Image (cartoon, grey):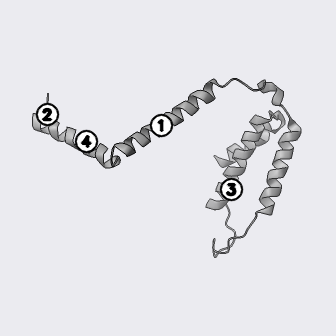
Amino acid sequence: DIYSPKQKQNKMNNAMNLLSNHWKGRKDFLLAQGQIAVVLVVAYVGNNWPHSYPRNENAKPYMFWAMNALLLIAGIATLKHDGNSSSRGVQLLSRPQTEEWKGWMQWAFIMYHYYRYYGAYNAIRVFVSVRV
C-alpha cells in the first residue's frame, strides 16, 4: 500500500465532507433518492407499457402538414421584435436565430417520425445537415 494510515483517513474525511456538503441532512438525501426512484419507475413503466396501437397504422401525411400549418400560424401569431437585440439590425446566423432554427428542426423531426411521413425524409436530412 502506498498510502499511510493518516493519508487514508484524510481521503476518507474528504469524501465524507464532500457528501455532507452536497446534502444538508438526512431529509435532503432521502428526497434526492426519492426523486431518482420516481425517475426509474417512470422509465420502467414507459419501457414496459403495452402498445396502444400498431405503430405502422399512424402513417398520416395530411396530419403532418396540418400540425406544421398550426405551428406556423402559432409562430406568426406570437412573433415579436426585440428592439434591444442588436444595434446592427438583423444579423445572419445570430444565436437566437440558430436556436429558433434548432427548435423548428426538432419539431419537424418529431412530426416526421410520429406521422410516418416519408415524403419529408430528404427535407429533414437537409435541415439536420444545415444545422450541423
The residue tagged 4 is 16
The answer to which of marks 4 and 1 sits earlier in the sequence is 4
What crowding class fits label 2: few (fewer than 14 Cα within 10 Å), some (14-19), or many (20 or more)? few
The answer to which of marks 2 and 1 sits earlier in the sequence is 2
For badge 1, the amino acid type reads: Ile
The residue tagged 3 is 100
Percent of width and height locating residue 112: 77, 38
Tags 4 and 1 touching, CB below 8 Å: no
The residue tagged 1 is 36
What crowding class fits label 1: few (fewer than 14 Cα within 10 Å), some (14-19), or many (20 or more)? few
For badge 3, the amino acid type reads: Glu
The residue tagged 2 is 3
For badge 2, the amino acid type reads: Tyr
Residue displayed at 52% across by 36% down: 38
The answer to which of marks 3 and 4 sits earlier in the sequence is 4
Report, in whole angstroms, how far the alpha carbon at label 2 lies from the one at label 4.
Answer: 18 Å
The answer to which of marks 2 and 4 sits earlier in the sequence is 2
Which secondary structure lies at badge 1?
Answer: helix
